[in-house]
Amino acid sequence: MQGVAHKIALLQGISCHSWNHDRTMLALCPNSNVVLIYKVPNVNDPKAEWEVVHELKEHDQLVTAIDWAPKTNRIVTTSHDRNAYVWTYENVHGVWTWKPTLVILRVNRAATCVRWNAEETKFAVGSGTKQVPVCFFEQEHNWWVSKIIKKHKSTVLSVDWHPTAPLLVTTSSDFKCRVVCAYISGVDSSESSKTHPWSNGTKTPFGEVLQEFNCGGWVRDARWSPSGKYIAYAGHDSTISFVTVQGPDSTTQTIKRPCLPFRSILFLSDSAVVAGGYEMNPNVFTESGGQWSFKGKVDKEDTQKEAGGIRSVFQKQVGEDLKTKHQNSISEIRAMKTSGSEVTQFSSAGLDGIIVCWEAQSLEQALKNLVI
């Protein structure tokens, strides 16, 4: 799989990033309290100059997550300062600028992650208070308010929305991955809370935990597949688990990898997942006949110098440049381009300050070229 590396914030590193709807602009945080919006001329040209066109400076501490809604063009950001802002692009006195609106989160610890739902009518925020505020716009008072899910026993590390139902998958440092109902009356249709896989035909109340899945360590990230048929979640014990969604009868398959833990997951399709993290090289897993397996690594390394597993990773860090495009851990993987329900281009951001854009002409060809 081809990848083009762009050296953006080499001194600071990149904590999070998100693309606009046509992938001509990128919002990222250079490991600080500021969000930079870059105009991206050509992601396939490693020598292209990326220009900073906007700086979002409302947060007081590290920005932990960014999500750019493709339909409404709204950006939501969260931070260690316990706040979230929704940014809208407006013409203010003849000048186009990003205007922030403070969200009423009602948390007294860091906000750790954020995701818009598919309709972009609400978003969920993870936090260090063991809570998940689900935020929506209240027309009557012209502000963003939240309802709180209080079912976690430790910091919430990631959230993701079901593609069609008002369901959240959340992960936490309490070693659990959960499926939770986030139905909000007046925002979601009443039928949507009755027809999901865990429903018994009656409306599922807000905040109800529908199922829990165990892990041997912190659960760093979880994602729904494009159809909602699968859930994938990654643990800090170097495992990745795949849930076949069948309501209360859902089954889990766990794969243990001989590498450093994953931090971020992305479904390329219903039958392929890419995961990246501390190993600095994204791994691909595929499904066949109901079973998931490790397919290979996205980035081609110098295999002649590979030996010793995790130990060699540390040796290479202190002794020589790594043979991968990323030179430090991958903080986040995001989709860039799609064809139907398949992701044909995705990006990985790292603490080395590098954005790598991975290109695949087709999913089948990309997987065929991977090195196991």
Image (cartoon, rainbow, N blue to C red):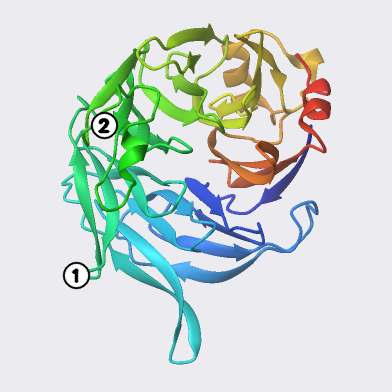
Circle 2 packing at 10 Å, graded few (<14), some (14-19), many (20+), is many
Q: CA distance from mark 2 to mark 1?
A: 30 Å
Q: Quadrant of the N terminus?
A: top right
Quadrant where the C terminus is found in the figure:
top right
Q: What residue is shown at x 38% (from left), y 67% (from top)?
A: 57
N-terminal of the pair, mark 2 or mark 1, is 1
> Which label was assigned to residue 201?
none
Percent x, y for residue 179?
34, 26
Q: Residues within 10 Å of mark 1 (few under 14, many from 20)?
A: few
Badge count: 2
Instruction: Judge by depth and name the residue closer to the eye, 277 or 179.
Output: 179
Q: Within the image, what quadrant is residue 139 found in?
A: bottom left
Instruction: Classify 372 as above or below 94.
Output: above
Q: Which residue is mark 1?
A: 141
Q: Is 369 displayed left or right of 127 in the figure?
A: right
Above or below, 354 against 273 in this view is below
- Side of 98 relative to 314 (left or right): left
Q: Secondary structure at mark 2?
A: loop
Task: Quickly name the residue at label 2.
Answer: 155
* Label 1 residue SS: loop
Residue 97, image x, y percentages:
47, 78
Residue type beneath disc 2 = Thr
Q: Residue at x 60, y 9 (%)?
A: 290
